[in-house]
Structures are given as C-alpha cells and as structure tokens.
Image: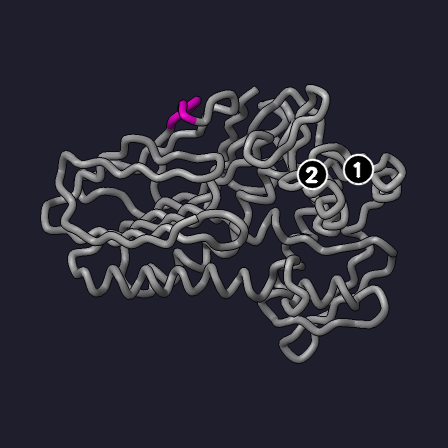
Amino acid sequence: MTDSIETRPFGRREFLAIGTGAFALAALPLALRRHMAVARRTVPVMGTIAELTVVHRDEAVAQEALEAALAELRWVETTMTRFSRTSDIGRANLGAGRDGVAVGAETARLVERALRWSSVSAGRFDAGLGAASELWDVTNRHEPPPAEQVARLANRSFWQHVDLTVSGGRGVLRYSTADLHLDLGGIGKGYSIDRAVQALRDRGIEHAIVNLGGDLYALGESPEGGAWRVGIKSPDDQRQVARTFEVSNRAVATSGDYERFFRYRGKRYHHLMDPATASPRETRVRSVTVLADRCVDAEPCAVSVFGLAQDRALAFARTQLAGAEVITIA
C-alpha cells in the first residue's frame, strides 16, 4: 500500500486511469483546458485503497480540498470501524449486549440508515451480521470454519435485535441477542465517500473522483461536456474490463465475489455473507453494480441485490432509489 501525491498540469490528450476494488477508471480523457492542476493521492484507508483526483485551476486550492476529503475518510474509519475497540462500533460490539453504549450522532444516523436497508431488503443486507464476517475472515482463512460455528449464526436476523435510541443529540445502542456484532462495512465506505465529496464541493471543486476500494463518486464533468467513463473489472481477469459506462455527478458501487476470497477444494469462498446461511452467498452472479445519487445508498443496495438476476435486482433498486441503475455480471 502506498501514500503518494502528484500535482501537475493536465493536457487534453492525456488520460486518467485509477482502479482498486471492483472498478478501474478506464482510459478517461479529461478533456480539460490546459493549465488545470490535477492533485492526486493514493492512500490506504478503511482496509482498502483510496484514490482521489481533484482538478482545479489553483493548485493550492486543489491540494487543500484533497486533504480535507481525505480527512473525512479517515474520520469515518476512526469513528465507525468494527476493527477498533475504541470506535463507536467497536465499543458497542463489546458492551451493547450488556448495557447501553453511547455513540456519536453521526454514527447513530448511519446505524439507523443501515437498519433501514436491512428492513427494506428483508434481511439480505444485515447490518448485525459482523460475527459471520469475523468467523469466515476470508482474507486470512484457507479453509471454511467449523460447520457448527457457522450454523450458530445462520438465519438469526440480527438487525432486528439492534435497539437504537437517540437522546440529546447522541445515540444509545443496545443488543438484545447474543452473537450480534454491528458491521457498517456494507454502508460505511459509501457514507465516507459522500462526506469526502461534500468536503470537495465546500471548497469549490467541480471536477473530481473519489474512489474507495471500487465504490466511487464522479463529481462533475469536463468543461467540454464529457462525462467520466468507468470500467467494471472482469471477474475472471481483473486486468480486463467487462463493461464500461459514462457517469457524471453520480455514485457507483459494486459488490463482487472476486476481490476478497479464498479457495478450498476447488470452491471459492468470498466475503459477501448470506444472512440465511451465515456463509458466502452462493450465486452464479459474480458482481452487481448500482448507480444512484449517493454512495451511502448505492453501496447497501448493491449488497442487498448481490446474487439476484438482473430484472429482480433492478426492480428492487428502483423501488428504493429513484432513477437507480443496475448492472449484473455473471
């Protein structure tokens, strides 16, 4: 993982290419007039790689805006990760099964939104299923966990046992069943991207990309009118692009089985858990991409419809998000 920075004039014939996670930004002509400064950063954050590109005439403005956007990503990670015992979510997972645990207002709002997605998806997105992700730990495991441990977590509808109350501008979390661990990993990246984009807008940035592990927001378009062109990586060969499309002022999120997984006896075990089985979801669909107005909605929507056929995925997405688009790859 690297933390790099680059700022330089950007010419009409040059191309921007970034890509981590499910996406590559493919052969994208910025089509901006000469003498535009392009500030770039590539940093590890939230267990993945963030790639930010900010375009502005004033190099100092571009740099300051880029740093502000990165600060938003890091703030969300520090505050809401399940991997820290001192974050809001980490403290709740340690103590909310015994006592109420106070969390910040922003955390409470995001938990509330996550629980809403759990509800409307009938539990296909279960914000309380963190224990299953911890048990499978697909980035470190080489074989499935014991079947009895998996069965203990299956079909528990954990999200229904999260009690959230708000008082005095703060939230209080309580868990009413054992084995419940909140995990905002299916919505937190999107939320942090939206915060980063707002930080850019607040500083006058009109053209930028915030890409976090494959979920991204494409801000603006070229002054000549061209939208950003995004490529979805092929599940079978991530050096190849399976689909491309153009996007401007739009959020894009993908759930796929080919980024984090292990193989055991010829079978792929990926990180997208099925709450009904507490195991990696079995499906012939390899990835699903959702386009929406905000990443905080596109990301959990993609998790919710992962594994569904194109028509069912699109129907669900559009009942929840006006104008949503869905792309599935088998």
Q: Furthest residue to the bottom?
A: 168
Q: Picture quarter containing residue 139?
A: top right
Q: Position of residue 235 (x, y in %)?
A: 52, 24
Q: Amino acid at mark 1?
A: Pro
Image position of 326 with respect to 55: above or below? above
Q: Is residue 83 left or right of residue 219?
A: right
Q: Regarding mark 2 in the picture, which secondary structure is present there? A: loop
Q: Is residue 135 left or right of residue 320?
A: right
Disc 1: CA contacts within 10 A as few (<14), some (14-19) or many (>=20):
few
Nearer to us in this view, 223 or 329: 329
* Residue at screen point 79% across, 66% down: 96
Disc 2: CA contacts within 10 A as few (<14), some (14-19) or many (>=20):
some
Tell me the number on the disc at residue 141: 2
Q: Position of residue 186 (x, y in %)?
A: 61, 47
Give the magenta-colored segment's residue range. Answer: 239-244
Q: Is residue 181 magenta?
A: no
Q: Position of residue 65 (x, y in %)?
A: 31, 63
Label 1 belongs to which residue?
145
In the rendered view of the protein, which quadrant contains the C terminus? Answer: top right
Can residue 318 be seen here? The reply is: no
Q: Amino acid at mark 2?
A: Arg
* Residue at screen point 62% across, 72% down: 104
Q: Secondary structure of the magenta portion, mostly?
A: strand
